[in-house]
Amino acid sequence: MKILIVEDEANIARFVQLELEHEGYETKSVADGREALDEALANDYDLIVLDVMLPSLNGIEVLRRLRQNKQTPVIILTARDQIMDKVAGLDLGANDYMTKPFAIEELLARIRANIKKSVGRESNALVCGKLKVDIDSHVVTYGSDIIDLTKKEFDLLVYLLTNRNVVISREQALDAVWGFDFYGNTNVVDVYIRYLRSKIDDVYGCQMIQTVRGAGYVIRD
Ligand code: CA
């Protein structure tokens, strides 16, 4: 089991690393947000312990960018008074959080629980009815058919599926898929929803992606 520790406070990082290695985990420790994102995207970790306050790219932003490509379990570390970090982290798909200062035994217990949960999940695939999205291989299938999606269509579909049963506004989809640095019109989301429907709903006669008037879009089970 490989765990990535992302923490810029050297004492905490070292302590967590020693404890995890003592428990038999393989670990790598990085202190910088951008470096952490590169590391997490380039390698397959079983879990990431991610501090929020980091140099170059904060933990929330690391998580947001990571989730565009990978569903590696993430436990975020937040300061006691940073409630918004906790909320933003969970919204963006953090699997769990710990408030600093924390007891190492609790962190270890949460790591065990989250790894167990993720191992029980089908090999990094999102499934909704006959639709299956394999996050690692980027292959999308409906029954036995392979659906050919562009990068943005794929990202949007993954975002909708990871937020299943939650109505996503155009702004949220825009932030998650196109990034905060995208200055275009939110209409681009509608356009890509149409592309997805033309490739999935229209072809298979289902209504996978639903419009919620005045609110946005949702994929329901
Ligand atoms: Ca920090």
Image (cartoon, rainbow, N blue to C red):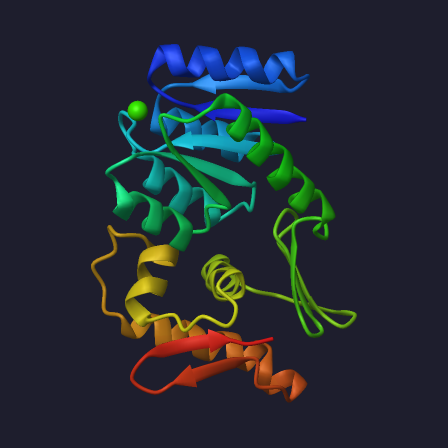
Closer to the camera, 217 or 86?
A: 86
Q: Residue at x 54, y 81 (%)?
A: 198
Q: Quadrant of ligand 1?
A: top left
Q: Residue at x 35, y 35 (%)?
A: 59
Closer to the camera, 147 or 11?
A: 11
For this view, does 167 lie left or right of residue 149? left
Q: Quadrant of residue 33?
A: top left
Q: Residue at x 46, y 75 (%)?
A: 218
213 up-or-down from 70: above or below: below
Residue 32 is at least partly visible in this image: yes
Residue 156 lies, in percent from the top left, at 46, 63
Q: Quadrant of the N terminus?
A: top right
For this view, does 166 lie left or right of residue 121? left
Residue 44 is at least partly visible in this image: no
Q: Quadrant of the C terminus?
A: bottom right
Residue 129 lies, in percent from the top left, at 69, 74
Residue 3 lies, in percent from the top left, at 58, 26
Closer to the camera, 112 or 149?
A: 112
143 up-or-down from 98: above or below: below
Q: Residue at x 30, y 43 (%)?
A: 85
